[in-house]
Amino acid sequence: MYTDKFQYHDYYLMDELLTEEHKLIRQSVRDFVKAEISPIIEDYAQQAKFPQHLVKRLGEMGCFGPTIPVEYGGGGLDQISYGLMMMELERCDSGIRSTASVQGSLVMYPIYAYGSEEQRRKYLPKLASGEWLGCFGLTEPNHGSDPGAMVTNFKDAGDHVILNGAKMWISNAPFAQVAVVWAKNEAGEIQGLIVERGMEGFTTPETHGKWSLRASATGELVFDNVKVPKENILPNVKGLKGPLGCLSSARYGIAWGALGAALDCYDSALRYAKDRVQFGKPIAGFQLTQKKLAEMITEITKAQLLMWRLGTLKNENRATPAQISMAKRNSVELALNVAREARQIHGGMGITGEFSIMRHMMNLESVVTYEGTHDIHLLITGMDVTGINAFK
């Protein structure tokens, strides 16, 4: 049985900036991960299987929609609590964090923020508990970084609309009971619709052959003249600001999550370097190994401080989408760099399933692309500081 030996690293005593509730929430999720996910995750990743039984457990642990008000089944927690939970989940595996952040930020958030009271009460409690799993349909086969060019559309048909089109690279799709789908109405305006499994013409073929996020379920959403009741249309938003608002929430969670992956790789590399003896002493005693470890913990510490500050701003409703973009890009880039250096410290053992390094490295190759690629986030920051749009 695999034993999760992870120890947290806090070089700048950042815990002093957290409340006792923050630390208790972080510890409870860490204990859950160590007891129930770490022992099985490598096997599921090797088999490219989604540990579906964890959905209910993630709901019971409060990992779905922790910032959603308690009256709708959420945790009523602050943004730093949410970030710490995502950090602990991705410390184990990006796919598990993806399952949680899609559910909370891309499905529950839009229903709460843009939905009717009837929609909130119908869907949010079941999503929060893990009874239902949800997914988010924005990316299309020919429209990724440019979602405004989407072709998925719906037309009025009396008491319902007819939805046609397809979405691609959708986390949770194969097992989801509910999909929040973004499509254009007859006026060309983007609106959100809640599509339920079982609606005629709605299918969710699974994506196979992935080398990344192998323990996460990925699929397509295909709509062939799907009848969607008009009461399933999100009434309180139109245009790209709807899906982009969801993505800001999700990107915030990713920024915390990728930091967790970096911490796990660093922790493993530090422990291995102290234990592995070559030329008569632990390899941690060699200058080049110390350089790698010193640079890792420096970048991790900078990111910890960045995420704490961003969480504080988000609690105050002052965090901008551009600030969130910077954090997402920074965390994922640093996590990829830490994973690659950690793999070198582990030598040949770094490519085996005995350690989490290679799994993190492969997962992060998806995380650096989804919900805004590395380059797109650079351009968002560039536009924010110059005032000039380089997208067009």
Image: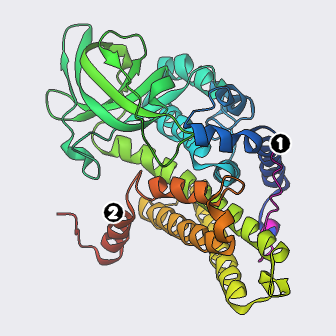
Tell me which amino acid carries mark 1. Met
Picture residue at 63% right of the left edge, 31% below the top? 51
State the image quarter where residue 103 is shown: top right
Front-lying residue, 235 or 223: 223
Q: Is residue 79 left or right of residue 167?
A: right
Direction from residue 235 to residue 392 in the image, left or right: left
Residue 176 makes an appearance in the image:
yes
Residue drawn 82% across and 54% down?
Answer: 23
Which numbered disc, 1 or 2, marks the residue that appears first in the sequence? 1
* Quarter of the figure with residue 288: bottom right
Please report the residue visible at 50 percent of the width from the left and 61 percent of the height from the top: 328
User: Magenta stretch containing residue 74, yes or no?
Assistant: no
Whether 253 is drawn above or below 234: the answer is below
Q: Which mark is residue 1?
A: 1
Q: Is residue 305 visible?
A: no
Of 295 and 371, the residue lying toward us: 295
The answer to whether 298 appears left or right of 24 in the picture is left
Q: Is residue 152 left or right of residue 384?
A: left
Hey, what amino acid is under mark 2? Answer: Ile
In what quadrant of the picture does the N terminus appear?
top right
Helix, strand or loop for disc 2 = helix
What residue sits right under mark 2 in the picture?
A: 376
User: Disc 1 and disc 2: Cα gap in Å?
Assistant: 42 Å
Residue 330: x and y, percent? Answer: 51, 69
Q: Which mark is residue 22?
A: none
Q: Position of residue 382 (x, y in %)?
A: 33, 74
Q: Magenta part of the protein: which range?
A: 1-15
Residue 87 percent across, percent down from the top left:
66, 54
Q: Which quadrant would the C terminus be assigned to in this image?
A: bottom left
